[in-house]
Amino acid sequence: MPSQGKGRHPTHPCCGSSCVKLYVCSNPEDSVIERRALREKVFPSFREHCRNWLALDVRLIDPFESGDPNCWPDANTRQQLIEECRQNSAGPFLLALVGHQYGAAALPTQVEASEYQLLLQQSQHAGICTRQLERAYRRDENVVPPSYRLMSSVKSSCSPPGEEKEDKENSMMRHQEDLRMVLQTAVSLCVQNRLMTAERAQMFYRSALDADLRFALESGSVKDILNRCVIYVHKVVNADGERGKAQRNSELQQELKAGISEQTVPTTSELLSQLCDSFLPALLTSRQILLYTTTTECDHRHGYTTARRRAYADSLCQQVFSDLMALTDSSSLPQLRGKAQVIDAPSREWAEQEQLCSILAQFYSITQPEEEKIRDYVKQEYQQRPLVLTGGPCTGKTVLVAHCAEQINAWLADCDPVVISCFCSFSVNTSPKYLLSRLCHQIAFRYDQRPLPKTDSCFCSDLDECSCNTNCGSASVLEPHNDCCRAERVCDGDSNFSNTPHSSTIEVDVSLSELEERLASLLTHLPSTKHPLVLILDGLDQLDNNVVAQIISGLPSPLPDAVKLVVTVSSSRAGLLQAIKLRYPRQGSLPRPGSDDREEETGYACIQLQSGDRKQCAKLLESLLRDSGRKVTSGQQALVNRALTSCCLPLYARLLNAHTSLWHSDSDVTESSLPDCVHSSISALLDHLEQKHGSSLVARTVSYVSLSRTGLCESELVDLLSSARGVPAECEGTVSQVDVEWLLMDLKDFLVKRPVADSRVLSWVSRHFKLVVTKKYLGTHEARRKIHSEMVDYLSGGRVVFVNHTSETENEPDGQPFVFPATEDVCWANTRKILELPHHLQQSGRLEDMERGLLMSSVFHRAMVQAGMLSDLVAMLEADEGSTKFLRERWLLASTLKSSACFLQTSPLQLPTVMETSILPYLDVFPALEGYVRDIRQDRRKKGKGVGSLLCSSSSSVPPIWYLGPNLKSRKNSVVETACTECGVVVEIMDEGSAWIWRGSACDLVELSLSKEQQELRFAGVKGSGRFLLLSTRCNELLAWDVADPERLIEVKQSLKTESVAGQTASTIEGFVSCQEKLCMWWKKESFVSVFDISSSTATRFQCQSSVMCLIASSNSLSIYCGQEDGTVSIFDLITSSLLGTCVNSTHSAVMRVILCEEEQGIACVDKGGSIALWDIADKQQPPRLVKENSNQGKTSSVLNTDYSEAVSTLLVCQSHQVTLWDTCNWEMWDQFLASQGKAFTQAVLSLDGHLFLALLDHFLLVLVWRVSTGECVLSLETNAQPFTLLKTALDIVCVSQDGGLTVWDSEMINAAGTATKMKRGVKAVVVEQTGKCFYTADGSENVWRWSLDVGLPRFTFLHDGPVEKMQLSPNSSHLLSLSAGEIYIWQTKTGENIARIRGGGTADVLITPNSKFGVSISKRGLSRVWKLPHGGIVCSIHQYLSDAQVSAEGTFLVGLRYGDLLAASLWSGSISKRFSCMENSERVVAFRTLWDHPDFVVVLTASEAVYTWKLSEETVCQHFQLPFMFHCQPQDFHMSPDGSYALLSTDNNSVNILDLSRVRLCSLKAEGPVIKACLDKTGCYVVYVCNPSGRERSCACDLHSKLVLTVIRLSDRERVGSVHLHKTPLVLTVSEQQGVFVGFDDGSVGVFSVADAAVNEEEFVWDRENLKGELIKCPLDREPLRCLCLSKPNITWS
């Protein structure tokens, strides 16, 4: 039986590693089968388990993995591998396999000189030949202390393939065995002569297994070993059988003949016994190792057979897997189980920056005099200027500031400073928006964590948490008598702070200018004298100049007194220095004690970092060599000094250490042996590594590290190198983990292991390594693209990342999923993949794969949100770089994420549900997103838990696809005029004269800056037509801009400007029309039209009779039509400038719009009062003829604007009190829409297809949308500020706010939401067919709709002569009964035919028996009747009225209440045959339910809140439960599951109360807020309820936190299956047998949701959208349901 050690649960708080590195210690000859079994069976499963459950990777370090013994690492290398595993493993680090064979002793690679001489002397005195020993070892003076090293000719080295390989290996093995015998003989002689202790002699006898085990368990601290080692000892009895016994006797006789004493040279059996029976058991308690001992007794004849070994290997695999799982996850999972991890990515990233600072500070080994200058700057008060640290490449700027950051707390010991170090070049994202947002977050977070004294003002991130929140909003922090100052925390009066989010929440919709202002505000208000801020920015000079300028511009100038800013700048980077000079110009008032001349010329302090001192570098080199146990000889030192004279940089000294550590005292070194600069030293180091490890391995390793975005994990590097992809044919072969680890040990001085997204990654310590690697290995674009492609293939699981959105997507490979699912509630985002894969897809040119496979992948989105990178995801979706095939789809996704950001940052696992619900209404607009929704549904089905949306109407507001806030420079100003072109370019003119341009796509608002004669031009207005924009300046100039040629502005000739009276300002341009290359312009109160030819820069003029009000050109640009103030329309030939005709309206009212109609055979004129005159101009030889005139008979007011849609033949005329629509086919008024009382229209425009129109009202923030066909207001589009105007482009509706902000909606999305199918009123009843594919809705009007879920649309509408009061569907779904005005309508469901219409009896309700053959009409005053379906033949009459009547499950009785009594009437005779009676007392019945699964029983609830069952056949009553005191049942909520197991009692106190009758217990399910609706499903498995969670989220006003929530709870274990947010208020809720949840909303729409739950083996209720594709091509109005008319009069009358 195996025995185990103590302590199975690890307590080692490992060093933040993200990898379990396990060193396999074994005898290579005795463990081949076992190690192969572990590699193949255990470690793949263990690695998957660690990745899924713990977000840890696993690396197996087997030093003997290679099949070639010559490639096995030596003892020194193995010890380094053990130490690496011990220091950097996130769990166990040692797995030892001790078999029945001890193994041969290893030759020492190094023997101290004194000990070596002793061995030689004793051997020579004994007459033993030492020639072999002397040839094998060579003296090395470079070792400290001097030693003899084993020559490379004796060491194992990889043999080249060939026929001589086997002979060479055998010869080498014999030579090593002879040398081992000589060495052990010498050692034994020393022991016999008492010149060496027996303990020391053991070092020469021990095998690799023994030596490795002792090093792993004896060296290092006990804390690093506790509970981290597992050892398996396998003792085999009679392992060799009879043949082995004879062989052992022969070997014993040879040893006796050799004369070696058994007492001085222990046998392998003795050494193995000492190891297993003494050494390891002694460590059970002190090291708490896990030790197993197994004994196998073999047959005397056959010994230890292969079958027995394999059987042991199988059992070993099971035990190892179990032990490793216990050692890794026993202390990690309990705290995570059942919790969804919410990651604070910004805080995590800044913690990583702090760790990086500590890592870089460790490289500070040469004291720099500049450190004292930085110290003086930090300690000096009232500086108000930054410190710039400049220096050449490799001078150590980064290392110096990292070291200073570690010292600042000591320098400022009298206060509590906040030190923030940002190493920008190491950031995962170097965009200015990202860096500024993270900087703002960290400053706010760090100050939020500090308790501030009463006298300091503190930024309060949450006003609800502030003790003085009722007064501080308007109080000044500078007022000493303010009461707020007495509080412990004080809120600033600055409005910018009151709107700042909590530091743990990242806003995703903040513009760059807002971030700049926020950073300046934080730096101004938060730091104080007791809590100063020291901000260190390093690596900015490695970023683009525009990024640098934007970050520097966000810093306040001058700096606040309590802020110190240190910026590093390379001397060769002029862009950053120039940005600092512009931001911090010289200020005479700044104190500059001790400043030099250069500082006097600038507004910043400057320190020049010089190259290191040669002596200091020499000391550094000496120290580095000493740490590795090496030195250089005096002759070699001269070469080193000469090299350091030419280059005395710290990095160069470290590179010299790498070169000189390879020297021996007999090495032939010359001046050329040492490179003369950093780059050549790096190149020489790589050359050496190629010779040692192979050129392919080295080249690929350094290339992968250099081209990675954030660095590479060791496990990733091993996986990449192990792949055969990209390896030359001559170099193909498996790369083991030991090979990679060996190479990394040679590079450890130049690679840093830094934390990135919860992983430890390898990065170059200096960017110059990347430069050399790029030049040496990656000089061509093709070479770089190849490496990037290999990394893409690896990260995507070995194949291209491509999602086909038109067909079923393939399952993602298990090796590299985006999300590792630990449990159903806990998952880990694969942060390495989401950080690296987009970068490599871009760099490899696979832009379409990136767009379709990542940006439109729901799994990628889920991983990004889960990793806390929501803002990064939004930025990626909004960017227009790369492939833009699905740009608008990405904008919709980004808009949805932004609107849900607050909710998703606290509930990331809700992302699939949120996205499905939001996108579903717009799939017909963006069919490319069908794959996105399909992936969500497939993932839910795979997970087996959740609630999905099948049919979901849009909310009452359409999300914008783009929003731009006002620029901070102009936000205090107002828009005076705006215009747009047909391609969507928008220009805004502000009241202070600035012009801002938005070019669409993902662009920001950009200011148009023009100057003339060294003076900046200010603008007065802008007009647009076609692709042209016309800008007017305040100096009376006109500039024409063709947006197709964005670099060219054309000045319109001065002669075209006219002045009415000399000395007065010029007239204001009113508009223009573009006719190919001609611009036809008219001015305010001017009676002429100017025509400017852009191509020839010539101008002409047309004179009209009165002031021109409007202008239109013919389609061929040959003529123009001028509407004038006196009601005249003049027609001119644009070529000849001649007058072709004149039209004069009878009203003589100003013409506001001229419309060409009927192929330019006529014109329509809209005058100022809204009247329309139609003129015939077909005969060019005759004057125009008035055809028709329509006068506006209503309230008169001036026309504000008009909009004409030729496609739908509709003209819109907007006036302040009404909007009028005209049918331009016959020029008749179509409809009029009046403004609500107290409101006035300011603008109205038609939608893209003319089925809707959008309108602005004065002093109203919403844009309202009306449906033309019904006249109802269907949508309200939200804006962030008071709208100024609406602009229409080819694809979008743009709302320009008065402050200059832009909100952009997709026109087709507005149409889809505005024309969505819904009933006229709120849905009051829903019944579902048995199959769940069709359902019926009633809204209290005369209509009942039959919906088909296959297409998601209503197929029939059953029309009645009056409002529908009730409806019932037969169980077989063949007939629908509806009740209207006391009459019963019987409908054939498949055909929509009204079979019968029954009058008589004053029916109040209708029921249908379970067999679908009989109907029951309930009458309050007359007879209630039982009749045959479908023809209405009466079976019997019931004389008494039964309220809340129900038909029993077997269809025998009608059960109902009468004056508190529960009665049962026979459906055959109509008589009351049963009465519920309680023996104890006569109680009033308040509620009851029949049971479908138990037809003979009725569950009864009495007024005393006792629960009974009533058996109808036997008339027996049984009391089951008495509700406790203060627990009340609500009769209107009382509902039973069909099997009678559960009863829904009430929905009060924010809970759903369930009675579990099967276990006789009460269950109270806590809801997130007040419960509005609740019901049980038809199967009795779930309870579904809708609650309002707003009461629990009072501090949050975001959209989703205030929405109603539909939740599904599994009744068996009360587990939440899923939830979904509802956009509207539900009026009715029901659940079908297929777990389809049907919800009727107050606006007439319907929602259908599916429940996926593998726990009850239910298949999810699905809807195939393919059936809808034929409906999508139809006009929305053509998809209205088919009208099914009722019979004109009743065909059955009951007397």
Image: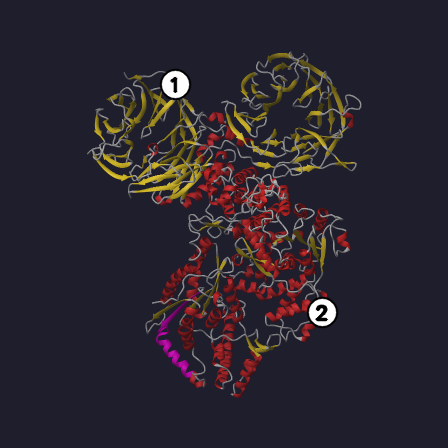
- Residue 419 or residue 248, whichever sits in front: 419
**Three-letter amino acid code of the residue under disc 2:** Arg
The residue segment tinted magenta is 229-254
Q: Residues within 10 Å of mark 1 (few under 14, many from 20)?
A: some
Up the image or down, 1524 lies above or below 569; here it is above
Asked if residue 39 is among those painted magenta in the image, a careful observer would answer no
Q: Could you tell me residue 944's position as x and y percent?
A: 40, 44
Residue tagged by mark 2? 642
Residue 378 visible in rendering: yes
Residue tagged by mark 1? 1361
Q: Could you tell me residue 591's position as x and y percent?
A: 73, 52
Up the image or down, 449 lies above or below 322; here it is above
Q: Quadrant of residue 1417?
A: top left
Asked if residue 237 is among those painted magenta in the image, a careful observer would answer yes
Q: Could you tell me residue 1154's position as x and y percent?
A: 64, 19
- Residue 247 or residue 216, whichever sits in front: 216
